[in-house]
Image (cartoon, rainbow, N blue to C red):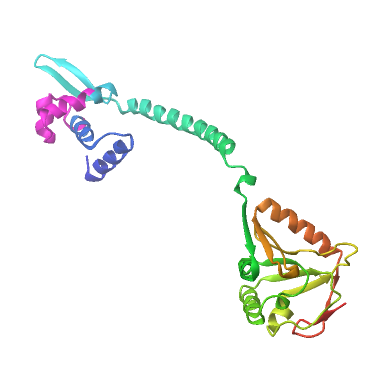
Amino acid sequence: MSSTETDRLHTILFNFGLEEEEVKIFEFLLQNGPSTASQISKGTSIPRTTVYRLIEKLVLTQLVKELVTSQGKAFEAGNVQELKIILQQREDELSNLKNSFKELEKITRTMATPEIAKTKILSYKGLDGLKQMTWNSKNAKNELRIIEKSTMSQFLDYGFSERARTEFLLNKIQVKEITNEKEIPAWTEIKQFVTDYWKCKYIPSSLFEVKFEILIYNDVYAMYNYENNDIVGVEIYNKQLADMQRQLFDFLWSNGQELKKLNDNGKSSL
């Protein structure tokens, strides 16, 4: 048997779960025919007590057969067809695992935390809280929907507002706004944000009156109010809620009138 054939034999038998010393015994018997435990031990350099222990296992799998001769017990290599028994066992185990996996999927779906229980709600208060909510919205992926009472510069300092708008620009966030205002004065020096990433539509208060400022992005639905110097806000992290609010926003958007941009600083009017 060539070294290549030997290496291949070892690899295949290892794949069937045989240990290295078991493979050595089987290979020795293939090459030398019926042999005693002493001969196997001497030929493989495996201690005789270990040879006996391993042969008992190999006999059970029919890879080694026990012979009774005039000199006592001897052993010879069995037919490799017996490995089909091991193969069938593996196939049965795999089939059982597949069935168990299907059952596992059902169980984990049943035990999984309901979507509503995964909801995270964060509350904010005061001007700092309002800044945090505004800053969080820069994490919007692709699009930010806003229902607004007025531009952020009217209640947040101009420098902070410009930094936020710069982040929207850098992150290439398309901003859609809905308002009850027919006219919006100039509100920014970030001109590219106005020209490329900002749109605003007018909805009459008779159709939809804006009482809270609303932000919708990713899996977030956020709202805040800043009347009478009492600033309160809340962020709700829930995909189903955010998706539903996006649908409501898009319905209003489809019924709105787009404000015409009068300059690149955001001044707009019907």
Give the farthest residue toward the right.
Answer: 206
What is the x, y in percent for residue 80? 31, 28
In-front residue for pair 9/214:
214
Say above or below: 37 vs 197: above
Which residue shows up at 86% across the image and 67% down it? 203
| For residue 237, side relative to residue 35 (left or right) | right
State how many labels appear.
0
Considering the image in quadrants, where does the C terminus appear?
Answer: bottom right
Check if residue 37 falls in the magenta segment: yes
| For residue 145, side relative to residue 183 (left or right) | left
What is the x, y in percent for residue 73? 14, 18
Which residue shows up at 47% across the image and 29% down it? 96
Which residue shows up at 44% across the image and 28% down it? 92
In-front residue for pair 60/203:
203
What is the x, y in percent for residue 202? 85, 70
| Residue 145 makes an appearance in the image | yes
| Residue 130 makes an appearance in the image | no
| For residue 11, side relative to residue 69 (left or right) | right
Quadrant position of residue 181: bottom right
Which residue shows up at 61% across the image and 70% down it? 128
Check if residue 36 falls in the magenta segment: yes
Q: Main secondary structure of the magenta part?
A: helix
Say above or below: 181 vs 232: below
Say above or below: 84 vs 243: above
Considering the image in quadrants, where does the N terminus appear?
Answer: top left
Where does the magenta region start and end?
Answer: 30-56
Say above or below: 59 vs 219: above
In-front residue for pair 125/198:
125
Quadrant position of residue 16: top left
